Amino acid sequence: MSDNLSTTLIISGVFLVVGVMFLMVVLQNTLKLATNLRLGDGVFRTTLALNDGERTKGLSSVGKLDSDQALLMAFPSEGKWGVWMKDMNFPIDIVWLNSDKKIIGIVKNAPTDDYPMTYTPKTLAKYVIELPAGTIDSKSIAMNNTAIFQINSGDIR
């Protein structure tokens, strides 16, 4: 009887460990990091793209963005980070920020049908923000404005 109990406890423990590991992997991949972003006259619920895979995917699988939503791509270093509209379902406004979070580039109403064109800033950027088309004008977003948001720099890869 005690051998059966020991075997049952060992098997249960293994299943518990495997289940917890599975949940950790699934939750890490499905729960996106988010922050609030203040830019111009707007406050946006912002999904973060902090690694190559998330940045490459961008908004390509998203059906639409609400007027108070954005995607913020953070890069490990400054560069002339490009944005393309591959597999996009809606037009967007694009904003590039330098490491001081100051706007250094803007594209309004990038259409969904211009892939493989790539939009790039004229100077080096550390962050790229994608917003619903029309947001730049409706929220008074302009060159040299400064964005306000918090990101743990250790999370950027």
Image (tube, rainbow, N blue to C red):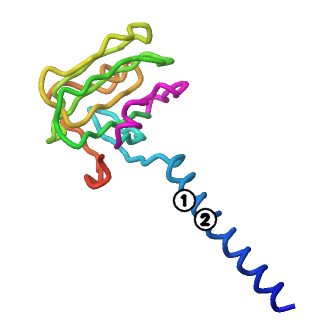
Residue 120, horizontal then vertical, whole percent: 23, 20
Mark 2 closeness class: few <14, some 14–19, many ≥20 residues within 10 Å? few
- What residue is shown at x 52% (from left), y 25% (from top)? 64
Instruction: Kindly give the residue lying farthest to the bottom in the view shown.
Output: 2
Taking the image as shown, residue 22 lies to the left or right of residue 106, namely right
User: Is residue 72 part of the magenta span, yes or no?
Assistant: no
- What residue is shown at x 30% (from left), y 46% (from top)? 157
The N terminus sits in image quarter: bottom right
Taking the image as shown, residue 33 lies to the left or right of residue 155, namely right
Q: Quadrant of residue 51?
A: top left
Circle 1: residue type: Met
Label 1, on which residue? 24
Identify which residue, 157 or 107, lies in the foreground. Answer: 157
Q: CA distance from mark 2 to mark 1?
A: 6 Å
- What residue is shown at x 57% (from left), y 62% (from top)? 21
User: Is residue 57 part of the magenta span, yes or no?
Assistant: yes
- What residue is shown at x 25% (from left), y 36% (from top)? 127
Q: Quadrant of residue 37?
A: top left
Residue 128, horizontal then vertical, whole percent: 28, 31
Which mark is on residue 45? none
Q: Report the magenta residues as a range.
A: 50-68
Residue 39, horizontal then vertical, whole percent: 28, 35
Label 2, on which residue? 20
Pointer 2 and pointer 1: residues touching (CB < 8 Å)? Answer: yes
In what element is the residue under mark 1?
A: helix
